Image (tube, grey):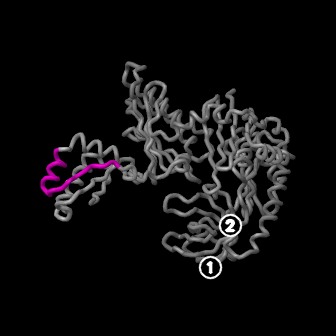
Amino acid sequence: MRKKEIVANVSNVETRIALMVDGLLQEYYLERPKQSSLVGHVYKAKVINLMSGLKAAFVNIGIDRNGFLPLTEIPFEDFSELFESDVELEHEYRPEEIKLKKNQEIVVQVTKDSYGVKGPRVTSFISIPGRYIVLLINAKNIGVSRKIRHRREREVLFKIGKQIKPGGMGLIIRTAAARAKSDEIKREVEVLKKNWERNLQKAKDPAPVLIYQEPDAVIKTVRDLFNSEIRNLYIDSESGYRKILSYLGMVSPRMRSRVKLYNDPQAIFKKFNIEEQLKDIHERKIWLRSGGYIVIDQTEALVAIDVNTGKSSKEKQAERLAFSTNLEALREIARQLRLRDIGGLVVVDLIDLEKKENINRMLREFKSLIRGDRARYRIGGISEFGLLEFTRERSRISVTHALSETCPVCKGKGRIVSRQSTMGYIERWFLNNGETVKGKMVELRTSPRLADFLSLHHADTLARVSKKYNLILRVKGDYSIHDGDFKVVVI
């Protein structure tokens, strides 16, 4: 059995949580006070704009960007209260028949964080997750996690769900419930219901107002990841340790013995070799053990991943080499998707294969690899050009975006103007403006890197410019100036 552990590092600046499998970093979560996710938060919102073409509305939830609410994300039974329309509840729902009132107040829950220029996506189907169940506030159905595949287990859990379902609400039985006792599941339903009713009192205030807030990263990790497969959970915060024990005391007392308070003088992430592994999370190129590598390029709309054999020479036959490299790359890609929390459309450029059975085997292998991922996938298959296309559910900003910011030099392109091109811009500047500085002492300020390049390779060009306009021209390196930029200053 694989050794799974959770390691949590809590500080005043940020909370970092790592899921380790056999000593290898598999998932990484980061929470900062000013960058915390809004996913799961419930608000009483106010309708600001109605977009008939999009069949959606923009609602104010009290943050700088309005939430996007599709009409299909509003419960059917609430139409009589939420819309000014003579819709009969008996016939099939059609969004085009529905009209929201402007300035109307409506309860919504965030399902996706803001991304790029887009505001958060919201829904009026409210769900409150727990460790074993998800409480559906305005739905009445009972569901069982698809990851519970044993038919007998599903039937037993469905019966338990029918017995404990609160009136007027629904339930989704989570995967962790498969190894829980019925009284533990029942107790959690009662806790979630009371908590929701207590928070609902805030809805009496005028919109926008926060009604329900998801717990912090530590408790969410315990709720969503800390199951019977996890051997130990290590945390270096005493207050966080007590908080976890208190939470488990309500939902799963028998798991408290697996929670360990870390007191070693050495930093917890250093001790578990996580700090070293986190360095690769920023890398564009990731090397494989065989000598091949993958390259990950992320844009706003999609993620492109290129697979290359690199220095790999393990196999002499081209087909076998391509197949083995592709398989190894897919294993690393599945890990990187979870580690970086990559979402949206993903296109993988695999090494071309000739045999159909090898292509089908790769697809089966990838489906098997992502089975343990909690995010939802839609796989489009492998095209005739060797492209594997799929989507991975994205609810929050990826880890790499949270850990980085747009480069002030390249503005996110990943490339900057070459030094040779910059020399051309400098020459054209003097051609257009040389008469204004004629006969003066001029300082050409550039980045130190560019200044060295100009002095070594273009001294003759600068000398001709000086002679043409009768200038005393000096090149000066300035660390405040980016590569590709320059300033001409008259002394």
Front residue (pair 285, 13): 13
Whether residue 440 sits left or right of residue 275 in the image: it is left
* Span of residues in magenta: 460-477
Residue at horizontal 17 percent and vertical 60 percent from the top: 439
Residue 466 belongs to the span the image colors magenta? yes
> Residue 199: x percent and y percent?
78, 64
Residue 169 image offset from top left, x and y in percent: 77, 61
Q: In this view, does 319 lie to the left or right of 335?
A: left
Q: Residue 43 carries which label?
A: 2
Quadrant location of residue 36? bottom right
Residue 451 is situated, as x and y percent measured from the top left of the image, at: 29, 46
Res. 373 mark: none
Sequence-first disc among 2 and 1: 2
Kind of residue at disc 1: Asn
In the image, residue 145 sits, relative to residue 487, either above or below, namely above
Q: At 48% from the left edge and 72% from the top edge, which residue is drawn?
A: 53
Q: The N terminus appears in which quarter of the rendering?
A: top right
- Residue 58's image quarter? bottom right
- Tell which residue pokes out farthest to the right in this image: 183
Residue 156 in view here: no
Residue under pointer 1: 103
Q: Residue 354, can we see it?
A: yes
Which residue is found at the position 58% from the left and 77% from the top? Answer: 99
